Amino acid sequence: MEAIEPVLDFWVQKLGFTKSSEVPHEGKLGFVILERDAVKIMYQSRKSVASDIPPLASSPQRGSFLYIEVDDLDAVSKALNGITPVVPRRKTFYGADELIVHEPAGNVVTFAQFTGR
């Protein structure tokens, strides 16, 4: 990712994650760990990766798909009010109620609540 700062509002302000670790790089965030309950999400900027692991500097940048199980999908949906879902909220054949969105860096995040367990 080019910059970490744009994803912070999504994870910290909207979803209640906290920054447990951060490393600056060239006046911006180069690396950050965001945590909430048992979930840890780590981001590293492209420039920081290139400095840290030079062979990866020329690798193509690809997105990620995250799948996060939550206890209260309604609360997540309310926190993400104003963010357009990838598809309408749905129930799956494997028993999950899911909300799928793009976070500001373009990664796909699925929040899922399982019922009847």
Image (cartoon, rainbow, N blue to C red):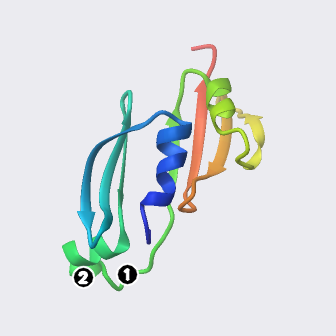
C-alpha distance separating marks 2 and 1? 8 Å
Few, some or many residues within 10 Å of mark 1 (<14, 14–19, 20+): few
Q: Where 3 falls versus 13 (above or below)?
A: below
Name the residue that disc number 1 marks: 59
* Furthest residue in direction right, as rendered: 88
On the picture, is 40 further left or further right than 12? left
Name the residue that disc number 2 marks: 55
Residue at position x 63%, y 13% in the image: 116
Residue 52, position as x, y percentages in the image? 20, 72
* Residue 96 falls in image quadrant: top right
Few, some or many residues within 10 Å of mark 2 (<14, 14–19, 20+): few
Residue 104, position as x, y percentages in the image? 57, 58
Residue at position x 36%, y 37% in the image: 35
* Furthest residue in direction bottom, as rendered: 58
Front in this rendered view, residue 1 or 6? 6
Q: Where 116 falls versus 62 (above or below)?
A: above
Q: Quadrant of the C terminus?
A: top right
